[in-house]
Structures are given as structure tokens and as C-alpha cells.
Image: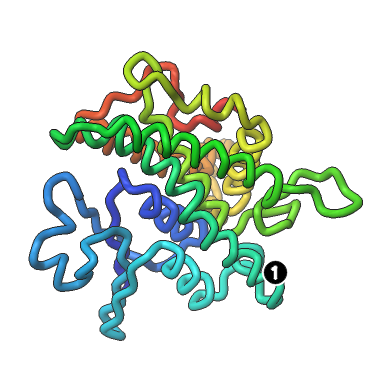
Amino acid sequence: MNLKLHVDFLSQPSRACLLFCLLNDLPVEVKKVVISRGGTTSPSYKSKNPLGKVPLLEDESKNFLLPESGAILTYLAERFNVADHWLPKNPEAHARVLAAVHWFQNNVRLGAAGLVYQKVLAPRLGLIPNEEIAEHSLRVLHQALRDLADVWLAHPVGTKDPVFVSGRTDDVCIADLLIACELEQLCLLNYERDDVDMKGILSDHPVVRDYLRRVARACRGNFPPPPPQPEPNVDENGIKEELPPVVQRDHYLEVHALLRKSAALNSVAIPANIPPSYVAKL
């Protein structure tokens, strides 16, 4: 397989890219990189991505290496001509989605990632957390969630239909995956330890909480179709054998289950009252 996606499952942008590939059944090989074990600082990895970050998309056939999740999602959407809702071809709709991708970095990601790093990851890495940065990150996050609700998720003129950040009411775009995967990372917070947790943060932003649930439901509608069932065998008495039902995989929950597994491998405890995905409680 020529296309390889280098990811760490504890990385929010990595999971967004992985989820996009799964939902669109793209021919991409997943290469696991473990940041906490020096995976992004090894000479072999730094030779591919001198930035030392994940995710990284590698196309051996073209000797092409692409960092940055927003660029990776854009490239994959355009290269494989996926459904239009992911990255619309209409210039104005296209620009809006890319605007949301750019906005996300210095708003939702800046706040959520900064908070989780100071509260959860820094101590696991043997570093002293900076409470001032944590408090600032929480303020940034709350403002980002207000802007997400009031600006990006505002109802189209003349309607009351709930929307995604593209302005569409019927399906997700690449920016929705980045935002949802970033906010799912808040499940690592433990109120008893950190004085803040995901449930408490989202309780102040019901529009965003409902939006996350819509993203999860929309992703379930984007699965590649299951393979057709074979015709059942018929015995000599004309009785057809019973075939096991086709189980439709839930890639959204699968990807966020990888977050939990990776957190456990890195000795990060997730509160027991948080489900595999916050939006699992639909």
C-alpha cells in the first residue's frame, strides 16, 4: 500500500484523520507512532517529518510527505473525490469549511489541548503542570465553545434546523471531525483530580453537547456499506441455514475507544463514569 498515515491514538488530530479514512474506506495503511516512547523524535521518523509531529501522511509512490491534519484531510478529500459534504466543491462552501479548519487550531484546539496537557499529560511525563496556563486554556476553551455555538453552528436564515460547521443541516465536513475529536479528549479530565471535567465543561454549552451527538450520528451514516451476505445453504429438507447478522461497525466509537486504550497504556486513568465516547449516551 503506497499511502501510509502515521498516527498516535492519543493525538486528537491523528484520530480525526484516521476516522476520515475509515468512514470513506480509503486505501491507507495506518502506522502507529507512540509519542511517549520517543516515536516522533527517532531519527527515522524525523527524517520523514522534521517537525516531529503526528499525524503525517506518506505517499511512497510520489515521494510525498504531508504533515498537519487540516492539510491531510483536505488532500485526501480532494485526491479521492469523496462525497461533497466533506469538502464542498462550491467555492464559497469550500472556503467556509477551510475557514473553520483554520479557526479550530487557535480556538478549540488551543484551549482543549492546553487544558488536557497541563492537567493530565504533563504530570504523566514527569513535568510540573502550570496552573496559570491551565486556567488560561480553560478560559480560551469556554470562549471557543461559545463562538462555536453562536457563529459556526448558528441556524441558517429562516430555519431552526441544527447545523454542522459547514452550515449544512444534513452532514458533516472535515472540520467537524477535527472539532469532535479534540473535544472527546476532554474525557481524560477527572474532576476529583483536576477540578474540572468534560461533563462539567459541556454542561455550560448545551448547543455544543448536542452538536457532538449529531456528529456521531452523522458519522454512523457515512460507513462504507457492509459486504453482501452470501446466499444461505439449503439442506435436503428445504430448510435454509441461519446466517449471522451483518454487524455495522461504528467507526466513531471505535476510534475513540483507541483513545481510551492508548491512555491506559500511558497510565492515564479515565473516570469510570465517562463512557467510551461521551456521545455514546444518545
Q: Residue at x 53, y 43 (%)?
A: 248
Location of the C terminus by quadrant is top right
Which quadrant of the figure has residue 57? bottom left
Q: Residue at x 45, y 34 (%)?
A: 138
Q: Is residue 199 left or right of residue 36?
A: right
Q: Amino acid at mark 1?
A: Ala
Q: Is residue 230 left or right of residue 63?
A: right
Picture layout, residue 189 above or below residue 259: above
As drawn, which residue projects farthest toward the right?
Answer: 158
- Measuring from the top left, give residue 256's x and y in whole percent: 41, 39
As drawn, which residue projects farthest toward the top?
Answer: 192
Which quadrant of the figure has residue 216? top right
- Measuring from the top left, give residue 212's x and y in whole percent: 59, 39
Q: Residue at x 13, y 33 (%)?
A: 126
Q: Residues within 10 Å of mark 1 (few under 14, many from 20)?
A: some
Location of the N terminus by quadrant is bottom left
- Measuring from the top left, give residue 267's x and y in whole percent: 20, 29
Q: Check disc 1 and report its element: helix, strand or loop.
A: helix
As drawn, which residue projects farthest toward the left?
Answer: 43
User: Does residue 275 appear in the picture of this structure?
Assistant: yes
Q: Residue at x 64, y 71 (%)?
A: 94
Q: Is residue 38 left or right of residue 263?
A: left
| Residue located beneath label 1 in the image | 93
Q: Is residue 49 left or right of residue 111?
A: left
Color encoding of the figure: rainbow
Picture layout, residue 159 above or below residue 89: above
Q: Choose between 158 and 229: the one closer to the eye.
A: 158
Picture layout, residue 162 above or below residue 279: below
